[in-house]
Image (cartoon, coloured by chain):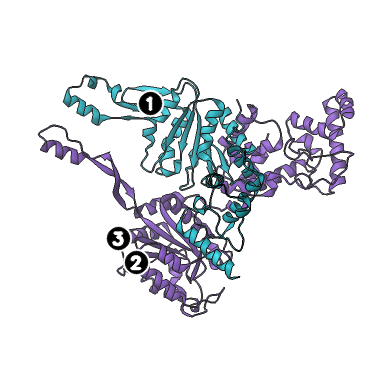
Chain colours: A cyan, B purple
């Protein structure tokens, strides 16, 4: 059981190594990288490539570690008791399973995605140490231990908004997805648009990497933006020769797909103005 | 087997632990990789390094270790390398005929011959001892990526097969931080300003009890939005020059602030604030941000923290053209004043011992300009600065 990318996801060798090591040792894999380099997608593609069910747990700033295990809905139970609902007698009826629980008891090995772990409170990863290490936890209300029958493949993504605790890091494999180089990028585009004309691809990538190199951009366009943009170029049937940036055109065609905020567009307009003056 | 490597990483200040080392060994035992050295590099990196800022140090230590190990050719035999690596190596160095002959001799002889061959090789190709990694003669030439590994008898002079770890592509990400930032984080937590906003998803106990009582004992559940930390901070860090001796504490503060504060924007300046600041701490001369832009971009609800030793000549603050590295059209004083007007909540953290503040004219001057809101960069000073920031300052405060 080895992961080596899929027909819709280009994985570099070092990424494959990290994924396979994490699978072999059933340790979590922590993935970091620039936005839009396919961190979240990795988990989905691993699940698809290996034919395993996936459980996605998307973290928000309000997410608590406990929510990944289970939640005891005491309020519903109280309400039911007032309404005389017969379900009240059984506490199990009010325990809501979290994603970890679902993944642990899936019946076959599954892939568990913990997305954007750095969004949560700084103690959040610490609260999950034991659960991810031993792949088991205790339910106080029913006095039972939930143990993973098949240790899931855990993939955790982080956007580097907060530092993660050392104790947590020690238990993970780590991979940093670098922004793809031109060749990798070509492969990625090919995977999504197999029929793209070489000329168009070349010109589009040229422009894309030029845009990325402009200093002072608030949000550099990433892979997903490139793909959107190329899709647009194809739909609008823009001829390859009119994509190129030159003295008469300093803003890319259909730039809305690449530049996502006003300041960046302004920046390009200023650059365009300057280049016209020269 | 790689204990030396482990210690070299430690020496290079990559934070590795035994647990991670054991994880690496376990992965090797499970045969995760196919004995190509690139695979080993990737595996070791995934297992041992947990932050991309250490990748560069790891690359250097890796390169150093493997060069050292391969230095003397017979070092190969002493170094406890997996047999498969050596066999793969032999397969590259000898022609099939030779190999067959040697294999009849047994492993020991094979290795001896290999050592001899390697010795010749290193002499012939580069003459130096650093032949692994540079010049494409690496015998461990990663059976996949750089097929031009070692060639015997054929044409030499293959391309530059620089090893991935020798490319040091992660240099830009390095930066020494973390270690004891926890205390600083706790101090920064004083800045937290909780606001209830957004979806009502938290159970309001008090409200529910009240509403239920009013409802004649029938439950009436009340919900409130969860509390969120809404504090916004602009951090201005002095770098270079006299700040070099305080770099560690500044980095710790910075790292802690990044971990603790959600709305944090940071800029760098040199000695005194002028019309431009830097966003990247390289202090390169190309990526400026206009100070005006900073003033216009962020609202007055941002709290400003300056970090700097405030130690310079006073003319750098008071004179036009006083900056030591460029011609400033307006004085540092003017700029500081503008910042303080735009952001009434501001403090200055000074890593210099407060006992020495009075002996430095520029510190005294800045102390006045910032209206006494200068604090030593110690936990205690940080604590005081943060509680001051929390209480919407703007009025002058007691001197330190």
Lateral position of residue A90 relative to residue B112, left or right = left
Do labels 1 and 3 touch, CB within 8 Å? Answer: no
**From mark 1 to mark 3, how far is it between C-alphas?**
43 Å
Q: Earlier in the sequence, mark 2 or mark 3?
A: 2
Q: Residues within 10 Å of mark 3 (few under 14, many from 20)?
A: few
Which residue is identified by label 1?
Answer: A138
Q: Residue at x 81, y 38 (%)?
A: B74
Which residue is identified by label 3?
Answer: B391
Q: Residues within 10 Å of mark 2 (few under 14, many from 20)?
A: some
The circle on residue B302 is none
A137 or B149, nearer to the observer = B149
Establish whether labels 2 and 3 are both on one chain: yes
Which quadrant of the structure image shows residue A174?
top right
Q: Position of residue A199 (x, y in %)?
A: 66, 47
- What secondary structure is found at the residue carrying circle 3? loop
Q: Chain of mark 2?
A: B
User: In which quadrant is the N terminus of chain B drawn?
Assistant: top right
Q: Position of residue A125 (x, y in %)?
A: 44, 39
Q: Position of residue B390 (x, y in %)?
A: 32, 58
Count of all numbered marks drawn on residues in the image: 3
- What secondary structure is found at the residue carrying circle 2? loop
Q: Position of residue B306 (x, y in %)?
A: 43, 64
Which quadrant of the structure image shows residue A253?
bottom right
Of all residues shown, which one is farthest toward the left?
Answer: B216
Q: Chain of mark 3?
A: B
Lateral position of residue B94 relative to residue A80, left or right = right
Which residue is identified by label 2?
Answer: B344
**From mark 2 to mark 1, how far is it between C-alphas?**
50 Å
Q: Residue at x 16, y 26 (%)?
A: A82
Q: Residue at x 26, y 20 (%)?
A: A90
């Amino acid at each position: 059981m080895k992961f080596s990318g899929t027909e819709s996801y280009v994985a570099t060798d070092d990424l494959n190594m990290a994924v396979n090591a994490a699978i072999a040792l059933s340790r979590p894999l922590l993935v970091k990288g620039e936005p839009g380099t396919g961190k979240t997608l990795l988990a989905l593609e691993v699940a698809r490539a290996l034919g395993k069910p996936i459980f996605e747990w998307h973290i928000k700033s309000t997410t608590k570690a406990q929510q990944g295990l289970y939640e005891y809905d005491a309020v519903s139970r109280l309400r039911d008791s007032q309404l005389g609902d017969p379900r009240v007698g059984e506490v199990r009826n009010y325990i809501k399973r979290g994603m970890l629980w679902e993944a642990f008891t899936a019946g076959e090995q599954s892939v568990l995605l913990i997305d954007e772990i750095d969004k949560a409170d700084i103690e959040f990863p610490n609260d999950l140490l034991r659960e991810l290490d031993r792949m088991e936890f205790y339910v106080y209300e029913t006095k039972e231990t939930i143990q993973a029958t098949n240790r899931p493949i855990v993939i955790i993504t982080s956007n580097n908004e907060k530092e993660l605790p050392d104790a947590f890091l020690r238990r993970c494999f780590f991979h940093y997805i670098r922004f793809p180089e031109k060749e990798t990028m070509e492969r990625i585009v090919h995977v999504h648009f197999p029929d793209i004309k070489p000329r168009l691809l070349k010109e589009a990538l040229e422009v894309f990497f030029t845009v990325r190199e402009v200093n002072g951009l608030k949000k550099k366009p990433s892979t997903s933006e490139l793909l959107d943009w190329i899709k647009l170029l194809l739909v609008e049937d823009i001829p390859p020769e009119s994509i190129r940036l030159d003295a008469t055109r300093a803003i890319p065609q259909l730039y809305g797909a690449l530049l996502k905020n006003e300041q960046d567009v302004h920046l390009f307009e200023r650059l365009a103005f300057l280049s016209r003056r020269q | 087997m790689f204990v030396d490597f482990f210690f070299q990483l430690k020496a290079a200040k990559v934070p590795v632990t035994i647990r991670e080392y054991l994880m690496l060994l376990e992965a090797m035992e499970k045969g995760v990789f196919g004995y190509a050295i690139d695979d080993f590099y990737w595996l070791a990196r995934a297992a041992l390094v947990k932050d991309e800022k250490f990748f560069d140090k790891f690359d250097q230590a890796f390169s150093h270790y493997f060069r050292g190990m391969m230095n003397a050719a017979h070092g190969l035999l002493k170094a406890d390398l997996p047999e498969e690596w050596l066999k793969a190596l032999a397969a590259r160095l000898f022609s099939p005929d030779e190999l067959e002959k040697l294999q009849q001799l047994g492993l020991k002889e094979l290795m001896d011959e290999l050592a001899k061959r390697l010795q010749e090789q290193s002499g012939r190709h580069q003459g130096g001892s650093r032949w692994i990694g540079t010049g494409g003669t690496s015998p461990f030439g990663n059976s996949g990526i750089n097929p031009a590994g070692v060639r015997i008898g054929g044409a030499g002079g293959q391309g530059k097969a620089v090893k991935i770890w020798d490319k040091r592509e992660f240099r830009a990400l390095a930066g020494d931080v973390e270690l004891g930032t926890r205390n600083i984080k706790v101090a920064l937590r004083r800045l937290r300003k909780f606001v209830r906003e957004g979806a009502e998803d938290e159970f309001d106990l008090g409200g529910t009890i009240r509403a239920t009582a009013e409802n004649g004992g029938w439950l009436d559940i009340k919900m409130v939005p969860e509390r969120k930390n809404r504090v916004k901070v602009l951090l201005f860090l002095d770098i270079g020059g006299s700040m070099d001796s305080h770099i560690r504490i500044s980095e710790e503060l910075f790292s802690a602030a990044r971990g603790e504060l959600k709305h944090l924007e940071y800029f760098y300046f040199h000695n005194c604030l002028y019309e431009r600041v830097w966003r990247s701490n390289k202090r390169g001369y190309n990526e400026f941000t206009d100070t005006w832009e900073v003033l216009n971009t962020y609202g007055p609800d941002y709290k400003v923290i300056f970090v700097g030793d405030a130690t310079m000549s006073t003319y750098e603050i008071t004179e036009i053209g006083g900056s030591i590295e460029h011609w400033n059209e307006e004085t540092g004083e003017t700029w500081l004043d503008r910042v303080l007007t735009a952001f009434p909540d501001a403090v200055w953290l000074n890593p210099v011992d407060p006992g020495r503040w009075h002996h430095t004219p520029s510190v005294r001057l800045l102390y006045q300009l910032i209206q006494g809101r200068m604090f030593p960069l110690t936990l205690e000073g940080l604590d005081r600065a943060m509680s001051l920031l929390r209480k919407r300052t703007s009025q002058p405060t007691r001197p330190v």
